[in-house]
Image (cartoon, coloured by chain):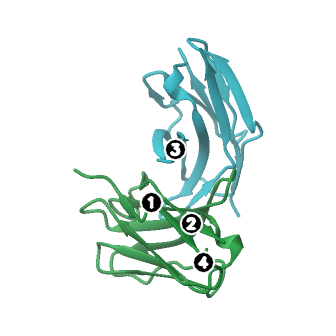
Chain colours: A green, B cyan
Amino acid sequence: GAGVSQSPSNKVTEKGKDVELRCDPISGHTALYWYRQRLGQGLEFLIYFQGNSAPDKSGLPSDRFSAERTGESVSTLTIQRTQQEDSAVYLCASSFSLHQETQYFGPGTRLLVL
Amino acid sequence: AQTVTQSQPEMSVQEAETVTLSCTYDTSESNYYLFWYKQPPSRQMILVIRQEAYKQQNATENRFSVNFQKAAKSFSLKISDSQLGDTAMYFCAFMKRGNQFYFGTGTSLTVIP
């Protein structure tokens, strides 16, 4: 079936504006993860969702970052009052369950804050 | 805390040759999983190979194999018969069961024709 999809693929915004990034996981995958990847660096965990359980938000860098997920489908990552240091690629991944260790990644959204 | 270290920021290899990418990690866990992911310029993260810590046998996937040394907390990736399509960033990752991934900073591999 289709892989993980993310939209938009690229987003340019002005400092101070809010942005919403979308992730569509693989159908049937109950676990969903968001990561941030700054230029030339590895992946930084942000948040994960597992079914209807409370999400693990321990990686969110500030209260400007929030994420929601509707059931076991689409997730949105919202960044309020964007700052230049928020510029990065935001990657979403899903797995069959929290205990299915292999994650499948989307192509990412490249965010540039001017 | 779990940390993953990739000490080789950049590497290159001639086409058809073999190259080994190194990865070390630090954990107090006894049961965990290790992964190598590949990220080509397209940005798509692709799973290359995975290893369960409780398995002594090294994982192999076609031209890709790992050398897993649990006591040394080392997890290197060997790419045999390198191909131009292997050019990418390679990330080593650690995962405790039921938790998030911890990624290394990556190794940029260039395959030279």
Side (left or right) of B51 relative to A38: left
Side (left or right) of A3 relative to B78: left
Report the Cα–Cα distance between label 3 and label 2.
39 Å
Where is residue B52? Give x, y as percent. 50, 44
Which structural element holds mark 1? loop
Cβ–Cβ under 8 Å for marks 3 and 1? no
Task: Name the residue that disc number 1 marks.
Answer: A9
Report the Cα–Cα distance between label 3 and label 1.
38 Å
Where is residue B45? Give x, y as percent. 48, 47
Say which mark, if any, is on residue A73: none
Report the Cα–Cα distance between label 4 and label 1.
25 Å
- Disc 3: CA contacts within 10 A as few (<14), some (14-19) or many (>=20): few
Cβ–Cβ under 8 Å for marks 4 and 1? no
- Disc 2: CA contacts within 10 A as few (<14), some (14-19) or many (>=20): many
Which structural element holds mark 2? strand
Pointer 4 or 1: first along the chain: 1
The amino acid beneath tag 1 is Ser
Q: Are marks 4 and 1 on the same chain?
A: yes
Q: Are marks 3 and 1 on the same chain?
A: no
Say which mark, if any, is on residue B54: 3
